[in-house]
Image: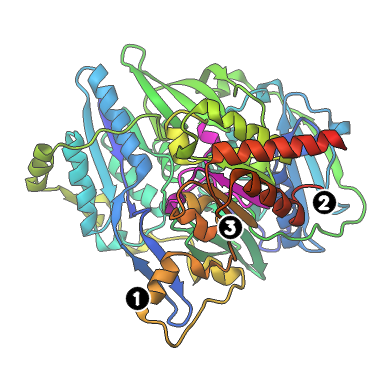
Amino acid sequence: MLRQINPQSREILVIGELTGGKSLSKLTKSTIIEAKNLAGREGEVYLCLLGANIRTSEVAIEYLGENDHVLYLISPMFGQYNNDIYNNVICQLIDQMKPYLVMLTTTDIARNLASRVAARLGAPYVAECTAVTRLERKLTFEKFIYGNQLVNYIQYALAETVITTLNSRRKLSPPDVKGQPEIQVLELEIDPDEVVCRLEEVIHPQQDRLRVEEAEIVVSGGRGLRGSENFRLLEDFADLLGGAVGASRAAVDAGWRPRSDQVGQTGKTIRPRLYIACGISGAIQHLAGMKESDKIVAINKDETAPIFKYADMGIVGDLFEVIPQVVERIANNRKAV
Amino acid sequence: MNILVVVEQVLSTETQVSFNQRTNQVEFRGEKYDMNLYDEYALEESLRIKENTPSVKITALTLGPQNAESVLRECLAIGADEVVHLNDELFNGLDEYATSTVIAAYAQQRKYDLILCGKRRVDTGSEYIGPALAEALEYQFIGSATDLQVDQKENTVRANQSLDGTTYILKTALPAVVAIEKGLYEPRYPTIKSALIAKKKSIPKIDAKTLGFVKENISNKSVVVKITSPLALKGRAVLESQTQSASDRMKQIMYGLVQGRKASILHEQPEMAAQKLIEWLKVNGFLSQ
């Protein structure tokens, strides 16, 4: 099913997410910045946000200007994520708009949605690219593969809409925008019969913590943490730094942390400003998920742990002795101020 | 009940990969191919359904070159009832879009009740096969699922879908395609005996012509125009020393010393280490002074 687009098409559709109902998530912001970079001065970026109750007047929209558009799609059916409904709506939107590129972020939901949208449309799908460039009639996607050990550049001719999920590598400067984007709010009537896959129950996470892919600082724990209760220490440390808590596969498979916290080849690839690896040996699969961090700190009892070869700062020691000292000192300094 | 499990042979996650800028070649160290990790869980889920449901037949399928056979033998050894190898020169180097078209053509006539696959490939991160098969066959689709339960009377499948920390418990009518996420369990291993038996079995192959594919109607939509290494993107000069032996060079690459990070490794008492870490955090702008 070829969805022909106008090769002169200048429109990019970004499907974004809100954090706390009012601000664009970090991943959404970096996706918009990449889209604006691609669109250049004449292109148009459409940001689409879906929700059941969005206080659209309170949402802080950044990086979009007078050439761009924000499209709020509102429906009570968007209260919980549902792949069938979201898929139907987004596919219809793409059919109408015919953008040359659709960009989503790399949250689990975004990837679940993107792959299905692409399949429904018969559109090419580049899963987790790290950058997109356009030269005349060709789109080139940069993509890391083999546990982020190799980089491929995959090219498509601008003949049909391409879908991609972006995990931005380049720290592009925010675009210089003039004016405000056009805002449209559409309340949709969605037939409940469109839900083919019935949601029986939703189990929300126990804590509403900052997610690893959203954080600039991540304190991560591995097998060395020895149990789920010990992660409380990392949570305290992360809180003082304003960061999130991540986990290695060992910690997740042991049931100590949720899978959504996992960093690594079978978890998430993240590029925070700071990654602190505690009790993590640094297996190649884990490194795949975090070695692109700006700065890496490693704390491990074993001085031969491979993680130290990738660290900017390493501490050979017992994390259960070092980290409480760190937490105490930082907390005391703050009290003293 | 007929279950199809789609498995893929992928580059092992243990394999070290680098890109030699001088020769423009991709280099492998410890080159090995394994069953895609998520596919192991897909197979395991099918076997758990079989344990709990009467008369289930499990077919494992792969599309791949000759040596992809080993993955199918592994499936047999672990407990699949039969295997199928979609194998043809025309199938080599196909992207996921084209691959799913071929698998759909195979599955079209055979009316599987449930099709399982891994949620994505560990080597390329591609996650197209599940949804694409569902589209092509007009089956329901659940992505990123674990803990499947089939109800034959109702003709439904129930699954836990885990996305961004939230668990959605879903139920849909069969036939369905379910893409499997890693569960909190170890997939079962083959026994030595079952592995030896599987080794002797002949693996049925299906070629392109049988499925109606010729050169003209099968192709990739994309082309890889360039390959490079992540280090090159960071502008980090790869150390080149005239005096280094090839094995030393290899060791360096292996040990990531070419990463360009200047590590200060502390062997201090916890109090001193903590103090120095805090200093480092301040100096690097992660803590206010």
Percent x, y for residue B45?
Answer: 32, 29
Residue on which the image places disc 1: B247
Q: Is residue B143 above or below residue B259?
A: above
Q: Are the residues at dot 1 and dot 3 in contact (C-beta closer than 8 Å)?
A: no
Q: For this rendering, which residue is in front, A230 or B174?
A: A230
Check residue A275 for magenta coloring.
Answer: yes
**Can see residue B250?**
yes
Q: Is residue A211 above or below residue B161?
A: below
Identify the residue at horizontal 17%, vertical 45% (top origin).
Answer: B73
Residue on which the image places disc 3: A292
Percent x, y for residue B26?
Answer: 41, 71
Q: For this rendering, which residue is in front, A226 or B265?
A: B265
Percent x, y for residue A225?
Answer: 50, 35
Chain under callout 2 = A
- Tell me if A319 is positioned left or right of B176 in this view: right
Highlighted magenta segment, given as a residue range: A258-285
Q: Secondary structure at mark 1?
A: helix
Q: Quadrant of the C terminus of chain A?
A: top right
Q: Amino acid at mark 2?
A: Tyr
